[in-house]
Image (cartoon, grey):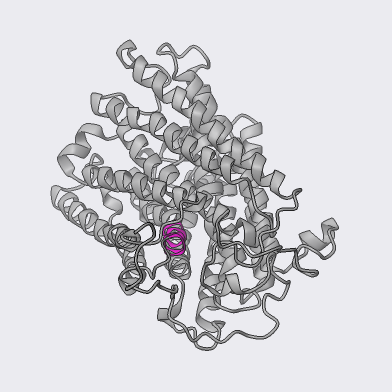
């Protein structure tokens, strides 16, 4: 991959994958690395299912007449797309897979603080996902992924309770994972690994875990109340029986806006690691980037009302939420500017992980700027519930969370498997994903500004050209997602061994064999260096080519 490869590397004799491979050994494992692999399999399944729903959505919207499926079926398709992608892929993807696998190694621990609870969290996640998928099989629901009341609590058709219970159960997986990470980071760091020597990947997961612990119980109780109203007709949200539907929006968005940062903060941690490794420099303003993660987590709980500008809340409340929305952009901007400063005059290596990191920075910046636009009361009133919101959401989620996940997966794949993937095809797929994504979602900004509402299966004919562009882009994006599956799986069968540190990166995870031993470290490491201390060339040395 790069010129930093070790000579004639080979797999170690014993590692976490070299043990028994019976179903019992995997399904009862307490090894955080194997549990991370189990999560990778699980989220891949749900990503494929959610992607299939996206294909159906874009096929329907290729023509204005709504001729592929009736409106009620279309409602079920976009609902299940949102539910599967948000609750079963985006939220758990990086923490459950890369966080599980890497966080203990990065802090010099042999495992997470509660290995049995870690395995339990995977089972809870899969049970919740199975219940949700069962709801899809028996007809699906038509509430939208936000489960807005009183539709969801009284009038929606289909197995609403089944899907709601599935999401409710999956929330406990998120809570347990966050608890495990917080305790592990506090209590199990290697000697010498002070808070300001922690990798920024760990800081990102620490901030994420705070949100998981504090926010997830709120949405869990909210879903429970929806079920109680639907089953027992208790007047909580339905105004016909004494409830308040706006209460649901407050409770739902109090969790669901911080949940955006559950999806984004781990990606930001991944990008920090990649930027440092491929620019051969210490992250510029390390402490500012670290504190920015905590700032995002805190401020994220204070902006939920910007989803409700059209709900009838007071202008005073709207102005306050608008101001805080502008404020929450500051720590995100700090990260983007500091990453850019880190790249400046760095010894850049244009490998695949860096391409994903740069794609993340560009697309997340567009998502963030359009988020500020939506935080402005006047503009939000114009584009609320239009495709402008859909485009903004996907620039943050797909352009941010998924590109961060793919960047991290490519960066640590040699560590996870001990094998190298095909660098040519990995770069091609990164380019295809970037092009396909922009072709898919940028036209939706224009559609939304022109007034096309989201969640409609038919639309005026003048919007067809932009919708065809979007559907064509989705096809390209789908190809970009399939290619990595092929070459990453193919890499498992080849004999291109990665060695311990194919990128020449710093960090405890790169000081142990690839794949890692079951116990991670034979002896506890002692940390004496500051984070991201890369050897710098002699400043007096003439540049190459001079």
The residue shown at (23%, 43%) is 309
Corner quadrant of residue 299: bottom left
**Pick the front one: 345 or 103:** 345
**Whole-percent x and y of residue 134?**
66, 38
**Pick the front one: 473 or 318:** 473
**Pick the front one: 90 or 348:** 348
**Whole-percent x and y of residue 234?**
46, 47
Q: Is residue 143 above or below residue 57?
A: below
**Whole-percent x and y of residue 288?**
30, 71
**Whole-percent x and y of residue 5?**
60, 61
The residue shown at (28%, 46%) is 371
Q: Residue furthest front?
A: 546
Q: Is residue 441 above or below residue 291?
A: above
Corner quadrant of residue 339: bottom left
Figure quadrant of the C terminus: bottom left
Q: Specify whether residue 451 is painted magenta.
A: no
The residue shown at (61%, 48%) is 43
Can residue 18 be seen in the rendering of this structure? yes
Say left or right for 393 vs 74. Answer: left
State which region is magenta. Answer: 267-278
Say left or right for 534 vs 166. Answer: left
């Amino acid at each position: 991959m790069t010129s930093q490869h070790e000579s004639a590397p080979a797999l170690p004799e014993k590692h976490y994958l070299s043990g028994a491979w019976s179903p019992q050994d995997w399904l009862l494992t307490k090894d955080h690395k194997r549990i991370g692999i189990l999560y990778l399999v699980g989220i891949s399944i749900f990503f494929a299912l959610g992607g299939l729903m996206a294909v159906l959505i874009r096929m329907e919207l290729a023509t204005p007449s709504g001729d592929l499926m009736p409106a009620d079926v279309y409602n079920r398709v976009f609902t299940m797309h949102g539910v599967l992608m948000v609750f079963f892929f985006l939220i758990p993807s990086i923490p459950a897979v890369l966080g599980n696998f890497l966080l203990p190694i990065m802090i010099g621990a042999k495992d997470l603080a509660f290995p049995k609870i870690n395995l339990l969290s995977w089972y809870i996640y899969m049970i919740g996902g199975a219940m949700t998928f069962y709801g899809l099989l028996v007809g699906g629901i038509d509430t939208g992924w936000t489960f807005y009341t009183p539709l969801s609590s009284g009038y929606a058709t289909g197995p609403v309770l089944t899907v709601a219970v599935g999401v409710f159960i999956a929330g406990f997986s998120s809570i347990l994972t966050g608890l495990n990470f917080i305790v592990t980071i506090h209590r199990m760091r290697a000697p010498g690994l002070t808070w300001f020597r922690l990798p920024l990947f760990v800081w990102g997961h620490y901030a994420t875990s705070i949100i998981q612990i504090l926010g997830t119980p709120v949405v869990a109780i909210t879903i429970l109340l929806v079920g109680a109203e639907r089953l027992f007709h208790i007047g909580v949200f339905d105004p016909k029986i004494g409830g308040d539907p706006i209460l649901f929006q407050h409770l739902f968005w109090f969790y669901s806006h911080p949940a955006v940062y559950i999806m984004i903060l781990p990606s930001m941690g991944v990008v920090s690691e990649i930027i440092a490794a491929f620019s051969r420099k210490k992250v510029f303003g390390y402490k500012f980037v670290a504190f920015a993660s905590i700032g995002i987590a805190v401020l994220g709980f204070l902006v939920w009302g910007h989803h409700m500008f059209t709900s009838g809340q007071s202008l005073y409340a709207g102005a306050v939420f608008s101001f805080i929305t502008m404020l929450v952009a500051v720590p995100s901007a700090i990260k983007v500017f500091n990453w850019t400063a880190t790249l400046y005059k760095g010894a850049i290596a244009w490998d695949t992980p860096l391409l994903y990191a740069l794609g993340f920075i560009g697309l997340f910046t567009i998502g963030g700027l359009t988020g500020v636009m939506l935080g402005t009361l006047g503009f939000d009133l114009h584009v609320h519930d239009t495709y402008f919101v859909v485009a903004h959401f996907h620039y943050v989620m797909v352009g941010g969370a998924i590109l961060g996940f793919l960047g991290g997966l490519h960066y640590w794949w040699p560590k996870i498997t001990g094998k190298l993937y095909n660098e040519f095809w990995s770069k091609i797929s990164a380019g295809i994903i970037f092009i396909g994504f922009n072709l898919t979602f940028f036209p939706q900004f224009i559609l939304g500004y022109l007034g096309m509402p989201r969640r409609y299966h038919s639309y005026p004919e003048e919007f067809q050209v932009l919708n065809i562009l979007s559907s064509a882009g989705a096809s390209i994006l789908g190809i970009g997602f399939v290619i990595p599956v092929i070459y990453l799986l193919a890499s498992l069968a080849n004999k291109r061994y990665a060695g311990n540190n194919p990128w020449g990166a710093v960090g405890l995870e790169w000081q142990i064999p690839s794949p890692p031993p079951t116990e991670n470290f034979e002896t506890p490491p002692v940390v004496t260096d500051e984070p991201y201390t890369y050897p710098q060339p002699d400043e007096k040395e003439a540049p190459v080519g001079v």
